[in-house]
Amino acid sequence: MAHTGGCQCGAVRYEVTDDLGGIYVCHCTDCQAQSSSAFGISVNVPLDHLKITKGTPKTFNWTGGGNAKHGAFCAACGTRLWHLSGDNDRNPSVKGGTLDHAIDLTDAVHIWTLSKLPGIVIPDGCRQFAEEPV
């Protein structure tokens, strides 16, 4: 099943030409800053199945959790679209809010709960990790 998404202004659009992979709710301070919220939502997809259908995203690099990270964003509106961890990552993490249709977080894995903001309640039964799962 194909999934589509893009930035807020519509300058960059993409399609995931396969089923979506694992869904993660990340409570790390990097995701809090990037999303301007309590957490970031990431959906893993195979790199070969992520196709840009409109525009050209800009990229940036940073270090997070001791790993090199590479991100893609829209230069016009600044929307973060996806990121890769390390130089050989073949599974980008698409930002959940950029998908055209809402994703179901029922089975999402909560990671970096060590940095979870006070007042955020993780539903009973959800898999969770204090840091990055191994």
Image (tube, rainbow, N blue to C red):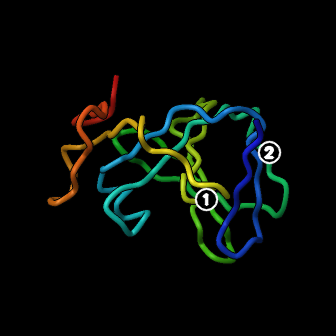
Q: Quadrant of the C terminus?
A: top left
| Residue at the (32%, 39%) spot, across then down | 111
Question: Which residue bears the numbered disc 2?
Answer: 51
Q: Position of residue 72 (x, y in %)?
A: 63, 56
| Residue at the (43%, 40%) spot, across then down | 24
Q: Residues within 10 Å of mark 2 (few under 14, many from 20)?
A: few
Q: Quadrant of the N terminus?
A: top right
Mark 1 residue type = Thr
Q: Residues within 10 Å of mark 1 (few under 14, many from 20)?
A: many
Q: CA distance from mark 1 to mark 2?
A: 14 Å
| Residue at the (61%, 57%) spot, across then down | 81
Secondary structure under tag 2 reads: strand
Tell me, yes or no, whether the two marked residues, 1 and 2, touch with CB atoms within 8 Å. Answer: no
Which residue is farthest left? 118
Q: Which is nearer the eye, 43 or 1?
A: 1
| Residue at the (51%, 32%) spot, across then down | 22
In the image, residue 66 above or below residue 77: above
Mark 2 residue type = Lys
**Label for residue 132?**
none
Q: Position of residue 41 (x, y in %)?
A: 46, 50
Q: How many marks?
A: 2
Q: Position of residue 55 (x, y in %)?
A: 82, 64
Question: Which residue bears the numbered disc 1?
Answer: 98
Secondary structure under tag 1 reads: helix
Q: Nearer the viewer, mark 1 or mark 2?
A: 1
Q: Position of residue 118 (x, y in %)?
A: 15, 59
In the shown orientation, is residue 72 left or right of residue 48? Answer: left
User: If you read the primary sequence from the N terminus, does the residue marked by circle 1 or circle 2 appear first?
Assistant: 2
Corner quadrant of residue 132:
top left
